[in-house]
């Protein structure tokens, strides 16, 4: 369904933990053959937090985005945190970020959390755009922050070498006079893949009270082959649905930012269509898969590197646990 | 901000665990003086799950709501799960409910999770109403399901006797020909109360890897007195903001369903305004505080008992961890 709303991204921010972890360090630490990480996951380096919290990383990213937007926190009408990981079970991460961001303590801006795992930023932008009307909601910030490094099983090389930590934020603004437009969005959830990606422990089914810590139960696990197979079948179906009512094709879009799921995942997508060189943006090699924070961090990097310019069209899209595919098309 | 959209609640559902726990049983089990639970918390009985999962309870509540609405799951445009507790960390609860609900496996309806703790149902209705446009979103289901009984510290009598488990669901539909209307909504987050309600363990700050289970760290805890003090100051401010653009007052509303936070919490609200007898709906005594599921279960009960009739105005409103107050005013 076309959205066609006069909404611009007026500010972006990003914050990484200080501790950069190169693949050879990780290989040494986890007794993984030298070169395996980069060859298998495509990740040369990623950031793993030491002292930083999700609240800290999220608040710093949001402050940079507000600064670029030229507004204060109290100018927002809503703060959405779209993330799969969190500092505490209660309160939610959005409230923690609000309590830590400059100006957050002094204002009553509503804060809420949204979770579609890796798609949480895309869903946050989609929901924000649908909710924005230039009246009640004129300015909404969406922050995604993930600390994945705690939930990695050191014996599962595939995930241990793939994931990283980080945060990014975007400020959306209702601006009929500016050129930014939210154009189109879609999400679909295919339940046959509901349990192909899991972090079982820590909820009510495997409660910490009854299930003491063990890395298998309390770490992220994915059935990589099944997921790649689902992606191969479902992405073309999803994209056909996405573009059915539009008068452009996927290859007409100026810049596409896929979720930085894995080297294999991005390659599958890249090979589905006849993309031009530079049309797909990647930062997997230098950041790893940062769950929901991957797409907005890549969007930030693309803008910084001049690969997405004002007036360009951009598609942010990815897959997520559950199993969902989502996408938002906008003019920057 | 007035919403004024032709949106009706066309179906409601509710599902409780089979195991009803009377206060005297709980007092015996936890060595609490006889009569303390009811006297202090106001709860005579609540339900604590045995075999039921959040996925099961949520799916059954949603099926009843779809049945009353006279539609199938695939007729929905979006499934929102608004809850603070969950079966698994990944995938999110919405995807788990979708995988369990009749018809969920066979359709691609998008599923997403929303968390504003106790306000999650209210926020879900608010967001759904803001997103609904009669085009992309014509029918949205909001499900709230909570299993709180796992996260209770048996040595903290206040919380151990207060909380219960349960689920409820509502189906919203864009129906210009029907009388239902979403009228008005507001949420505010006051960060000075960010940490007055906490479940610290299980996130990245106190990760299960480094912090073995202990009931204090891994149970819900609240600073009751501080919360009641915040409620006393902030609720009148919030309600003044809520009604400032409306031509009615809070006492003009046919039925008000507050979050069933605690006897003291409801009493504070009740005494703030000159309410008529029966204007405030309660089910705390027979259900306990079921976090986000309390308000929709009470809404379900009010409709079943004939206390909310078609054409009546209804305000659902409450406080939540973080610290937020929210409310949605609608004509049923």
Image (spheres, coloured by chain):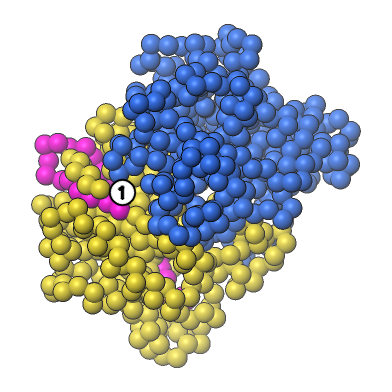
Chain colours: A yellow, B blue
Q: Nearer the viewer, residue B286 or A20?
A: B286
Whether the magenta-drawn stretch holds residue A168 is answered as yes
The number of numbered badges drawn on the structure is: 1
Q: Is residue A79 left or right of residue A196?
A: left
- Residue farthest along the front direction in this orientation: B70
Q: Nearer the viewer, residue B215 or B148?
A: B148
Q: Nearer the viewer, residue A221 or B109?
A: B109
Whether residue A292 is visible: no
Q: Position of residue A57 (x, y in %)?
A: 40, 55
Residue in the image at 46% along x and 49% along y: B73
Residue in the image at 17% along x and 37% along y: A175
Disc 1 crowd rating (10 Å Cα; few below 14, some 14-19, many 20+) is: many
Q: Secondary structure at mark 1?
A: helix
Q: Is residue B34 left or right of residue A154?
A: right
Residue in the image at 41% along x and 68% along y: A164
Q: Position of residue A189 (x, y in %)?
A: 41, 58
- Residue farthest along the bottom direction in this orientation: A33
Whether the magenta-drawn stretch holds residue B110 is answered as no
Quadrant of the snapshot with the N terminus of chain B: top left
The residue wearing badge 1 is A125
Q: Which residues are magenta?
A: A159-186
A285 is higher (above) or lower (below) than B214: below
Q: Position of residue B212 (x, y in %)?
A: 68, 62
Q: Nearer the viewer, residue B36 or B296?
A: B296
A265 is higher (above) or lower (below) than A101: below
């Amino acid at each position: 369904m076309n959205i066609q709303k006069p909404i611009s991204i007026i500010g972006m921010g990003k914050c990484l933990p200080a501790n950069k972890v190169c693949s050879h360090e990780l290989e040494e630490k986890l007794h993984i053959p030298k070169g395996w990480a980069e060859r298998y996951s495509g990740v040369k380096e990623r950031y793993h937090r030491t002292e930083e919290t999700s609240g800290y990383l999220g608040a710093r990213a949001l402050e940079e985005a507000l600064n670029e937007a030229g507004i204060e926190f109290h100018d927002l009408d809503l703060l959405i945190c779209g993330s799969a990981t969190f500092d505490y079970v209660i309160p939610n991460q959005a409230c923690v970020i609000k309590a830590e961001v400059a100006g957050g303590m002094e204002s009553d801006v509503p804060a809420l959390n949204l979770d579609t795992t890796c798609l949480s930023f895309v869903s946050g932008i989609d929901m924000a755009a649908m909710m924005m009307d230039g009246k009640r909601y004129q300015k909404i910030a969406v922050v995604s922050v993930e600390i994945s490094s705690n939930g990695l099983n050191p014996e599962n090389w595939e995930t241990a070498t793939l994931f990283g930590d980080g945060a990014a934020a975007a400020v959306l603004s209702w601006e009929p006079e500016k050129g930014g437009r939210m154009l189109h969005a879609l999400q679909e959830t295919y339940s046959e893949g509901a349990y192909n990606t899991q972090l079982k422990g820590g909820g009510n089914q495997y409660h910490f009270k009854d299930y003491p810590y063990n890395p298998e139960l309390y770490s992220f696990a994915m059935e990589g082959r099944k997921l790649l197979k689902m992606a191969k079948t479902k992405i073309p179906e999803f994209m056909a649905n996405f573009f059915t009512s539009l008068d452009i094709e996927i290859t007409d879009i100026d810049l596409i930012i896929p979720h930085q799921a894995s080297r294999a995942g991005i390659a599958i997508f890249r090979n589905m269509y006849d993309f031009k060189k530079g049309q797909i943006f990647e930062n997997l090699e230098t950041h790893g898969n940062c769950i929901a924070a991957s797409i907005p961090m890549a969007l930030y990097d693309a803008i910084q590197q001049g690969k997405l310019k004002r007036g360009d069209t951009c598609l942010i899209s990815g897959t997520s646990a559950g199993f969902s595919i989502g996408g938002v098309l906008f003019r920057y």
